[in-house]
Amino acid sequence: MAILVTGAAGFIGSHVSHALLGRGEQVVGVDNLNDYYRVQLKRDRLTPLLAQPGFRFTEIDIADNDAFNTALRGEKITGVIHLAAQAGVRYSIEHPFAYSRANVTGHLVVLEYCRHLASLQHLVYASSSSVYGGNEKLPFSESDPVDRPISLYAATKKADELMSHTYSHLYGLPQTGLRFFTVYGPWGRPDMAMWMFTEAIVAGKPIRVFNHGDMKRDFTFIDDIVAGVIACLDKPPKADGKSAPHRIYNIGNHRPEKLTDMIALIEKSLGREAEKILEPMQPGDVAETYADITAIQRDHGFAPKTSIETGIPLFVEWYKNYHGINS
C-alpha cells in the first residue's frame, strides 16, 4: 500500500513526501517537471527522495488522462495528496491556458482516478487562500463567500473545490481541500517574494515592493504546513447523512505580517539593506491575507509553531547554503 503525491518535485510536495517516508510510508510521486521555474531546483528536491527505497517516481503530466492512469496501473494507493498545479497569480494573467489544463483538467483526472480506486481512503488536495479574492472581512473564514475571484488562478482553485464537492456527493469520495496561506521555507519557490527579495539583495539589485509596501501576508512555515497536511490525511471526513464527505480548511499561521517586516528580517539575516522600488498594486493581488484556522485546529489539532522571526532566517540560511554563498 502507498500514498500518491502529485507535484512531488514541488516545494510542498517534496517536503510532504519526506515526512511520509519518515514515518514508514511507501510513496509514489508524480510530477511533470515543467519549466515554470528552474527545473534543476525540482530535480534537486527529488534527489534525496530518489535515494530512499520507499519512494517511486514517474515524470508525468496529470492532465494527460491516459498517461496518468497507465503510469499508476497496478499501484495499491490508499491515500492521495494532490499538490500538482500551475501556481502563481500574476503568471495566470499572461498564460491562462496553463491554468485550465493543470488546475482544472488535471484536477478532474485525479478525481476520476480516485473514484475508481477501491483501496482509496482519502484524497487531500491543494486549494488556495486566493479564492477569497478581494474579501475585506478579516480573518478569512471558510464560511465566507468566495464567488468573486480576482485572478484566473483563484478561479481555477475554486473550480477544484466545486468539482471535489460534486465527486464526494456523487460517489462518496472522502476529500479534504486545504486553502494554503503563503507557504515559505527551505526549498521554496523562486517565483515567490521571499526568494526574489533574497536573490536581489544578495546580487545588490533593487527589489520591487508592491502597493508601496502596504501589504500583509499570513506567512506559514513549511514544517507547519506539512504537519497539517498529514494530520488531515490521517482523518478522512465522513458522510453524516446531511452532507458529502468533503471538508475545506484554511491552513495558515493565523498571524498576518507586514511585508516591510518580512523584508527587514531578510535584510537582517543577510546583513545587507535592500534598495526598494515602491510600486502600485499588481493586477490580481490583494492587500492582506489572514487565516481563521479555528476549524482545522478543532478537527485536526493543527497548531502552527513557527514565527517569521524563526522561519525567515531558516529560509535565508538554506538559500545561502544551496547557492554556495559565504556568510
Image (tube, helix red, strand yellow):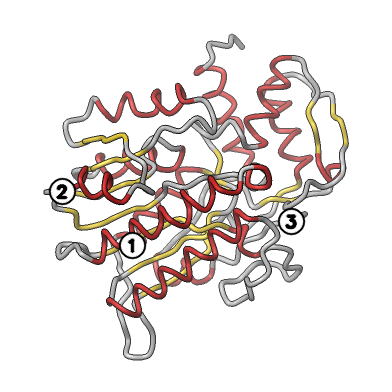
Q: Which mark is residue 288?
A: 3
Q: Amino acid at mark 2?
A: Arg
Q: Which mark is residue 51?
A: none
* Residue on which the image places disc 2: 73
Residue under the image location 80 percent in, 32 percent down: 208
* Residue on which the image places disc 1: 111
Q: x, y (%) of residue 33?
A: 41, 32
Q: Nearer the viewer, residue 165 or 61?
A: 61
Q: Earlier in the sequence, mark 1 or mark 2?
A: 2
Left or right: residue 232 versus residue 53 is right
Residue under the image location 28 percent in, 47 percent down: 68
The 10 Å Cα crowd at callout 1, few under 14, some 14 to 19, many 20 or more, is many
The alpha-carbon separation of the residues under discs 1 and 2 comes to: 15 Å
**Label 2: element kind:** loop
Left or right: residue 172 versus residue 326 is left
Report which quarter residue 44 is drawn in.
top left
Q: Nearer the viewer, residue 80 or 157?
A: 157
Residue under the image location 64 percent in, 67 percent down: 140
Instruction: Please tell me whether mark 3 or mark 1 is closer to you in this view.
Output: 1
Instruction: Please tell me whether mark 3 or mark 2 is closer to you in this view.
Output: 2
The 10 Å Cα crowd at callout 2, few under 14, some 14 to 19, many 20 or more, is few
